[in-house]
Amino acid sequence: MSQFSKDISIVIGGAAGQGIQTVEAALMRILKDAGYGVFACKEYMSRVRGGSNSVEIRLSSTKVPRRAYVRRIDFLFALDTVALEHLRWRIGEGTTVFAEKSDANDGKVGRYIDTPLLRFANEAGNSPLYANSVALGVILGVLGVSQEAAETFLKKTFDRKGEDIVVKNIIALEKGYDFGRHTAYAEGIEVIVSPEEEKKDDLLLDGTTALGIGALAAGCDFISSYPMSPGTGVLTFLAQHAKKTGVVVDQAEDEISAINAGLGASYAGARALVTTSGGGFDLMQEGVSLSGMIETPIVIHIGQRPGPATGLPTRTEQGDLNLALYAGHGEFSRAIYAPGSPAEAIETMQHAFDTADAYQIPTFVLSDQYFLDAISPLDTGDVPRIPFARHVTKTAKDYRRYVLTKDGLSPRGVPGYGDGLVCVDSDEHDESGHITESFDVRKDMMDKRSRRLDTLRNNAMMPKEFDNCKDAETAVISWGSNHGVLEETLGKLGSVRLGGLHFAQVFPINPEVKKLLKGKKIVIVENNHSGQFADLLVRELGVTVSRRILKSTGEPFCVEELVEELKLELTTDN
Amino acid sequence: MPQETDIAWCPGCGNFPLLTILKNALRELGKLPEETVIASGIGQAAKMPQYVDAHMFNGLHGRSIPAAMGIKLANRNLTVIAESGDGDIYGEGGNHLLHVARRNPDITVLVHNNMVYGLTKGQASPTSEEGMKNPIQPDGVIVEPFNPIAVALSVDVPFVARANVSDPAQAKEIIKQAISFKGFSVVDLFVPCVVFNKTNTYQWFKEHTYTIPESYDPTDRVAAFRLALETDRLALGVLYRNDTRELYEDRLGITDTPLYEREFNEQAFQEVIAGYR
């Protein structure tokens, strides 16, 4: 008899092309609709077919939602032998492995259940391709969730491939389902996570979709970009919705063109976005500097992946904070956001557009592969919205683009709106926007471009306090994608000595943050090698960071390792 | 341009006659300053919009074309010109010339071709002739010059022309045609550099050019290639014209409403998010 309560970690492993993504999509939809708490994340190799990839789906009660990667596997569904070997290090005593007997390697830890995935697939459709639908059926059978919703899902997914394919998938599903039911009974597997009320209206969002929705909510008008993993998805999202929403989508010949086209569109009044990854962003840096000089807004999404150079193309890292922070020659103002949940992605994307427009600067949204691919639900009513404002002025005949003002911000005109001429220049320029070599004008313009940083700083988003950070003696800090893993870890440890602080805006840092940290020991969790955000906090606030918990293997933090790391905080005397 | 502007070109520079030619062309076309944008890159040629009464986007080296395209896509009611030198557009920005030509937005590219680098002081440009001595190749240029006309034709730039500022009347007519053309137009302009290019002078350009005869059919792309490959004397006029290519703006479904006037479409937004339930 083995009972699974609280939350269950289900992992499906297979080669690229075996359809594990379909299983993921189906399970997430079915379980979410049925009222379970769900979370999914994935890891995959940089290849189109073959290799070994896996998805992790966490099933929990909606009351204690889980949204972090765990190393532990409760149910492993291995679609081939390679998947089993690939995931062997995560198989523990509590793991139940569903795999073909030939793959099941007796004598290893864990319980192995001979699962005829291929035989059922062949019986259903005379092809091993149906093994994923068999696996989906087995999972639902083991969980005791009705297969009806899965049938609907398969019908919808494979509809365009014809009735024959749909029928074969459903037969495969049913065979798997019966097997799952019988196995659960025979093996005494009991899943006692119970669903709450149905959540059919909740959205299921991966980070990519959430950022795309955020861009649409912000009134994004234009995107020009060049594909690069993992930043491509935002471009794809907007392209898919271009017709409906009117966003102009341009696939650029290179990243240099992308950002310069974006700046051209922005100069002409569009809300413009570019999306890329660190390597592509390297090429965009001249555009960041241009944005700073001509005070023309641009929003830059960097989906981080491990570098330097090509690095690990499909893996995750938070290694490009310094890149965003220092990109572009010369000195000018900028703002950087780093969302930690789909809701924050939607929110910060809107902030990024609004701040870029209001302050006439480049703004960044930093995400990473783990975040972009991780899926969690969001109540439709909880989609954050920020009022939409254009920040564009109608020009008069005597309009001067860079007229000096107290706060350094000049009314932004755009060509064709009003009688004035809008002149912008990458050279140092006078108030009219024309080239100058006057040192006096240079001084005024440098001050003008820098002065807004104070306002930006004072208006920066405050970090989110959680786990009673106010009273804790140690503040454990996350930024960007580590929010979920830190939240779950602190919840698990349940110590009053540790509190959490999550930054969704990482630059500039609101001076008020210093008050939150006063008298506290500071520990920072970062998915990089040096602790870039720790350095930034030290520089910006003059605080001391006691410990940096870092990881730069290309994998995200898992709850288990962060629990171990933070236990050290509780065993050492301060 | 402000009255007090001190023009940064050298006395005798070919940019001066071109400035007059461009201003006259815009005036004769009835293009008002407030409906015209000149995007430029970097270099002496790229200073042109500083001295023309029009909107100006003086961006980065080599990037006038993508910037101009972005402007056009954001507001297609504007007349958009990208203008820079041969180093800027054929060298630093070569990739943009190739790929924006494939998209075919309605913008005009004016290239000041003086076959040398001016602002960086006399180095070879992509169009410098083999053997031209310069600070970096003291024994003379050892690479093949770039053939802008042939390259433009190879990517089916739908309007390809060449003009010489020494013939202002012809140059103005060609520029007017290029701006009026609905699509991506490229004009290679011979604009002598009097300081750094002692070979390709006003005189040299006069002796090495001829006007395409009126009987020439500019819709014949193969004939245009033949002209592009001539080396002894260089053809002036409209070498190629293809009025059948669809505009990028149209293919993208861009309307006359500038993007800054676009209203937030709440219904479309709700429909999109509903798809993720």
Image: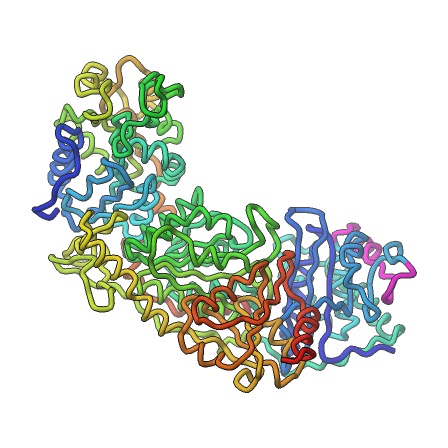
Extent of the magenta region:
A106-129
Apparent side of residue A565 relative to residue A97 in the rendered image (left or right): left
Residue A562, percent from left and from top? 66, 70
Residue B77, percent from left and from top? 24, 50
Residue A256, magenta (yes or no): no
Residue occupying the point 18% across, 53% down: A430
Apparent side of residue A103 relative to residue B41 in the rendered image (left or right): right
Viewer-side residue, B168 vs A93: A93
Query: Which image quadrant for residue A273?
Result: bottom left
Residue occupying the point 22% across, 54% down: A442
Residue A223, percent from left and from top? 41, 54
Quadrant for the C terminus of chain A, please. Answer: bottom right
Apparent side of residue B269 relative to residue A97 in the rendered image (left or right): left
- Residue A340, relative to residue B5: is it above or below? below
Query: Which image quadrant for residue A512?
Result: bottom left
Report if residue A212 is visible in the image: yes
Quadrant for the N terminus of chain A, please. Answer: bottom right
- Residue A445, relative to residue A36: is it above or below? above
Apparent side of residue A370 relative to residue A360 in the rendered image (left or right): right
